[in-house]
Image (spheres, rainbow, N blue to C red):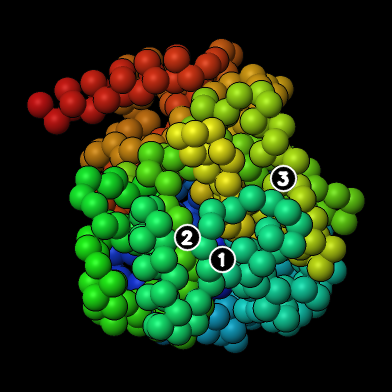
Amino acid sequence: MITLHIANSRTAGMVGDLSAMTEAERSFAGAAATRMVWFAKDDDVLVLPWRPKEDTFIDYVTSLTKTLPSSLRFVSPPPGRFGADILSPDRLADEVFRAELRTALTDRTVGEVSPIYHDTAVAALVRALGVDGALPGIAFSEQGGTELINSKAVFRAVAAGVGAPTAPGAVVTSKGDAVDAIDALLTAGTSVILKQDHQAGGLGNEVVSRVEGVRPIGARQVVLAVDRRAVEEYIARRWDWLTGGRLNPVVIEHYYPESIPLFIEYLVTDQGIDLLGYGEMLMSPVLAGVVSPAPSLSPDELVELDGLARRICEPFRVMGYRGVLTPDAFLTPEGELLFSETNARISGATHLYKAVAESLDGATRLGDRAFLERGKWQVPSFGAAVDRLEAAGLAFDPATKTGVVLVCDMTSVDGTVRHCVVAEDLEHAYEMERRLTSLSASARA
């Protein structure tokens, strides 16, 4: 039995209108999709927007996951309406691509289909291939259920229903209601965060404040609105963007400056809800990396986070969702734990728990090692990055189960690689990161 991996790293259910993505955002998504190689085992088949430009990345990843690279098969559909960097629905429906994929699967039995995001386009592809039983939760996802879970408006309703704490706020569908909700919170002396219903990494969020000096964390920018008239002008100017160009609802909430963004990730199956990992999201001002485990959480706060997050996940499990599910939360400066959204997809941290950690030959996922993934390393090529790590003694060492792991090759986009530091604890992780920064600086000198 093999797994069919589908790297649909950007979908409308995740980020809203795909036509609103810039060319740079699409290029980034295409390169980020190659992280799917981390999940591949012998004989698996991978559907990627495009095959990695060099085998160096594939050889590097499979050397750590102990996968035979020559046993893997890669299939990519022709470019579609949005180009060659995202697996848009039209690309997955392409008959030439489907025929090529059937050929790649001819002598292999598909035991599981594992997409990044379980949307209707993936469900249709799976039905066309005749491997319906290999996609967990297909009945739910082919009716648009996964998009429902990723809705921030739906999340607020579910969280309220199960008694999980969220920031005071409202879900609005009209400009007038938006102005009223924002003005009421501002008048009460708080700043306000506005969220697109579907977007990721804080890219669909903006903060509105009556005072200067508020720092955006998990939002694109802070907009100053000194009175109700300024709020009205802001909403008139940004309403189309806030509604995603699709008349989506807008979430308006009390914004807590200097809060710590958290995530906790589960695998939802027929049998239950299994913890994969948890950590902090590093914002600059939108998502720039993750650190795990979360250094700001006390043991009691972790117990609280896990208990409430499972309560949020359970209704979606009962409804039929199967796959990775990540409730996001934040810890206020006063120590209050509040939830902000759910993400039903393979996340930007899943590879740390499902691939990198499993490459540690027995190190436990949640306690034996610290993971620090952030920043970009400018390099001539992915191969050069591998060589420099080896020469500096920073490369991941299977014997000590520590070192720098190169998780994603972005050299075709911006000349960088994304990396994760694996260490005994966060203190050693930060020290190793400083050494890598020094290495980067000396290479530029």
Q: Residue placed farthest to the right in the image? A: 271
Mark 2 Cα shell of 10 Å, populated few (<14), some (14-19), many (≥20): many
Name which residue type carries label 1. Answer: Lys
Callout 1 secondary element: helix
Numbered badge on residue 253: 2
Distance from label 3 to label 1 (Cα)?
Answer: 17 Å
Distance from label 2 to label 3 (Cα)?
Answer: 20 Å
Q: Residue placed farthest to the left in the image? A: 445
Label 1 belongs to which residue?
A: 152
Image position, residue 223 (x, y; %) = 25, 61
| Residue at x-position 61% and y-position 37% | 278
Q: Is residue 373 left or right of residue 382?
A: right
Query: Which image quarter is the C terminus in?
Result: top left
Q: Is residue 92 above or below residue 185?
A: below
Image position, residue 295 (x, y; %) = 52, 25
Q: Is residue 80 above or below residue 168?
A: below
Distance from label 2 to label 1 (Cα)?
Answer: 11 Å
| Residue at x-position 35% and y-position 72% | 21
Examine the rendering and report whether any part of residue 431 can be seen: yes
Numbered badge on residue 308: 3
Callout 2 secondary element: strand
Q: Are marks 2 and 3 in contact (CB under 8 Å)?
A: no
Mark 3 or mark 1, earlier in chain:
1
Callout 3 secondary element: helix
